[in-house]
Amino acid sequence: MNLLRKWLAGLFSLSTPEDEPSNEVHQPDRGSALTVKQLQKRFKDVHDARVQQLHHDSRTVTLFYVRSLIDVEKLQVDILFPLLYGQKDHTDHAVVSDQVQPVPDLEQAIHQSLQGAVIVFTEGNVFAVKIPSTLSRPIETSEQEQILYGPKDSLSEQLEQNLTLIRRRLPVPELKSCMFNLGTLSKTDVALLYMEGITNPELLRTALEKTSNVDYDAFFDSSHIGAFLEDHENSVFPQFQHTDRPDAIAAALASGKIVWLVANSPFALIAPITFFDMFQSPEDYVQRWTVGSFLRSLRFFAFLAVMILAPMYVALTTHHYYSIPLQLLYLLMESRSEIPFTPFWEATFMLLTLEILKEGSLRMPTKSGQTLGIVGGIVIGQAAVEANIASNILIVFIALTGVASFLVPNYIMTTSSKLIQLLLLILAAWLGMWGVIWGLVFALIHLTGLTSLKQPYFAPLSPMFWRDWKDTVIRVPLPKMKHRPAYLNPVTSSRTKRKI
C-alpha cells in the first residue's frame, strides 16, 4: 500500500514549499486535450453530474463524477479528505485507491464516469479513480436449481461478487478472465472465464472471436448475449447452459468449458454443452452414485414422457384403437362417448389449459401461485370431465405430463420439450403412431447436426466418445471419473496427479 501511495503521489501530488505558485486556479490542465468543459457539455441536462473544485496552496484540483453511480463515502474518505487535508510534507497520502487509471481522451472519460469513476483533473494530468456504488443484494439460495444437499449460494447481479464466489472455489492463478464491454448504449461488462492449461486453445479462440464480434446497442441479461453467440439460432434446443450456481460454474471450468458472466445478470452462460448436460444436477455428485444415476435416468424418462404421452393418446384413439386391449378400449369408449371433440382438439385444449395454469402460478406471488396451481388443476380438471370436454384417461395423461415436466432441471429444455410435444401431437393426429415415430426420428437427426461453440451437441453419442459415457445417462463413482470430457479435447485430460 505504501508503494501504491508513493506512486499515486507522483500523479496527484499537492503543492510543496518548493513549488512555484500557479495563477491557473479555475481551469486545470489547460495544455491537455481533455477539459472539464468538454465533459460538462456531453453531460448537459444530466441532473446528477457534478463538478467540484478543490483549492490547496495555489493549486486547483477539479473533480467530475455522476453522483448516483459513485460511493459517496469513498469519495469523501479516499479522495476529498486526502486532497484537502493531506500534509504537505507527506504527499504520498494524496489519494488512496487501487482503481486509478489514466484518461487519455474524452470518450474514455465518459466511459469511466458512467462506470462509477471520479475524473480527477490536476495540473498536467487527468486520471479516473473508480469508486462505484455497490447495490448488491445478500447471497441467496438458487431458486431455479434447488437441491437438498450441496452448496446453497447463488449468483447475484454484481459481477465482482460473482467472480469472488467462483474464485473461492478455484483459488488458482490459472483461472483467467477476459473483460469485454458490449452494447453501445448499455456498456455492459462481460467477463469470459476459462482455465489456462485445461481449456482447448482453439475453443478459447472461437469464444473470444464470437464475443468480440457481438454488435448491438443494449444488453440487459446474459441470455441477450447468448443469442449472438449460439451456432443455431433457429433450433428449439438451448446451446448454452444458464445457471446461477457457482458450484456448477466451477465444475464446468474445471472440465475445460468456458463461462460468461454478465454485469446486472444473476445467470452465467456455460459452453460448450451437450444434450445430456441439460439433465444433470449438482445434486447428482453429492448423492450416492447409484441414487444419482437413478434420478438422472428418471429425468430422461420424464423428458420423453412429456413429449409422447399426449401424442400417443391421440394416435391410439384416432388411428390405432384396434391395438388397445379390449378392457381398456371399453373404458375409453365409455369416457369419450359424450365428448363432442376429436381426440386432437381434446388433448390440445387440456394441454393449453395446463400451460396457462403453470404460467399463471409462476407469475403470481409464491403462496397465491401454489394455491392457483392446486385449486385450479383440481377444479378445472373435474369440471372438464363433468362438462364432457375431456375424458378421465386424458386427464391422467395430462397430469402425468405436467408432473414429469418438473423433473428436468433446465427450464429452457423443458420448454423445448413442449414445442416438440405440439409437433408430435399434430403428426399423431395426421399419421398416427408413424407420425410420432417420424417426429422423434427428425428430432434425433436435428440433434446430431447441432453444435455448441462448434463442438458436437449430441456427444458422446454422436460422435461416439466411449470414455464420456461414465457421466451421461448414468454416472460412475467419482474416483473412477479420472478424465475430463473427451469431446472438449482439453489440454490436460487427466483430473488426477496434475500440477497446476
Image (spheres, rainbow, N blue to C red):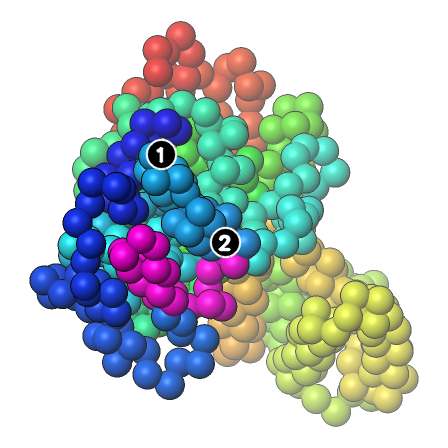
Quarter location, residue 236? bottom left
State if disc 1 and disc 2 touch (CB < 8 Å): no
Point out residue 55 in the picture as x, y percentages from the top left corner: 34, 60
As for residue 67 lying within the magenta part, the answer is yes
Q: Which residue is mark 1?
A: 90
Query: Horizontally, is 151 left or right of 260 in the view?
Result: right
Residue 24 versus residue 346 in the image, above or below: above
**Region of the chain picked out in magenta, as a range:** 52-72
- Rendered residue at 68%/82% (across/down): 349
x and y, in percent, of residue 235 in the image? 37, 64
For this view, does 158 lie left or right of residue 44? right
Q: Is residue 327 visible?
A: yes
Type of amino acid at the residue the image marks with label 1: His
- Kindly identify which numbered label has been placed on residue 27: none
| Residue where numbered disc 2 is placed | 76
Q: Residue at x 52, y 59 (%)?
A: 72
Q: Label 2, secondary structure: give it.
A: helix
